[in-house]
Image (tube, rainbow, N blue to C red):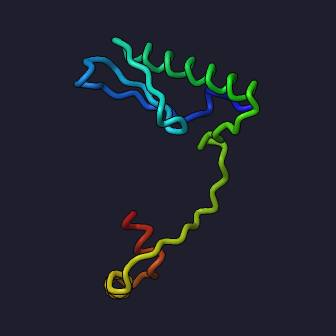
Amino acid sequence: MVNHKHYTYRVTWSSEDEEYLAQCIEFPSLSFLAQKREKALEGMTDLIHEVVQDMEKNSEQIPVPYSEKTYTGKFQLRIPPELHRAVSIQAAEEGVSLNRYISAKL
C-alpha cells in the first residue's frame, strides 16, 4: 500500500489562473487550483489519496514515490565524441577525473 503523503508535491503561482497551482510529480496529468497555497497543497494531496485508492481497487499499477525509490548514484549518458573529448580535456586541465569534473558541473 502506497502512502499518498510520500509523493513529491509542488505548489507554484499560476499567473494564467491567478491562483496557486499544486502538482504531484509522480502524477503529471493531475493538478489542483486554490486561492491559498495551503489549500492548493491540501487539495492536491487529497486528490492523490483518492486516485491511489481507486487505482488499488482496480488493481492498477501505482507509481512508486520518488522518496521511496533506491538510487545507486550512477547513470549512463551518451554524448557526442567531440563533447566527450572536450570535457576530458577540461577535466585534465583542472587536474580531476572526468567523473568528478562532470559531477561538479551538474
Give how far across and how far down residue 29 sits, in percent: 47, 33
Name the quadrant containing residue 40: top left
Give how far across and how far down residue 92 sits, in percent: 37, 87
Q: Can you name the residue that lies furthest to the front here?
A: 58
Q: What residue appears at the point 28 percent right and 25 percent down from the top-left corner?
A: 14
Q: Is residue 81 above or below residue 18?
A: below
Give how far across and how far down residue 67 sits, in percent: 61, 42
Q: Is residue 51 left or right of residue 2?
A: left
Name the quadrant containing residue 39: top left
Q: What residue appears at the point 27 percent right and 20 percent down from the top-left corner?
A: 17
Q: Is residue 3 left or right of residue 91?
A: right
Q: Is residue 6 left or right of residue 30?
A: right
Q: Is residue 63 left or right of residue 1?
A: left
Between residue 41 and residue 97, name the one nearer to us: 41
Q: Can you name the residue that lies furthest to the left here?
A: 15
Q: Is residue 72 above or below residue 53?
A: below
Q: Is residue 22 above or below residue 78?
A: above
Q: What residue appears at the point 49 percent right and 16 percent down from the top-left corner?
A: 43
Q: In which quadrant is the C terminus drawn?
A: bottom left
Q: What residue appears at the point 44 percent right and 80 percent down from the top-left corner?
A: 98
Q: In which quadrant is the N terminus drawn?
A: top right
Name the quadrant containing residue 66: top right
> How many numbered marks have been drawn onto this rendered protein structure?
0
Q: Is residue 29 above or below residue 92?
A: above
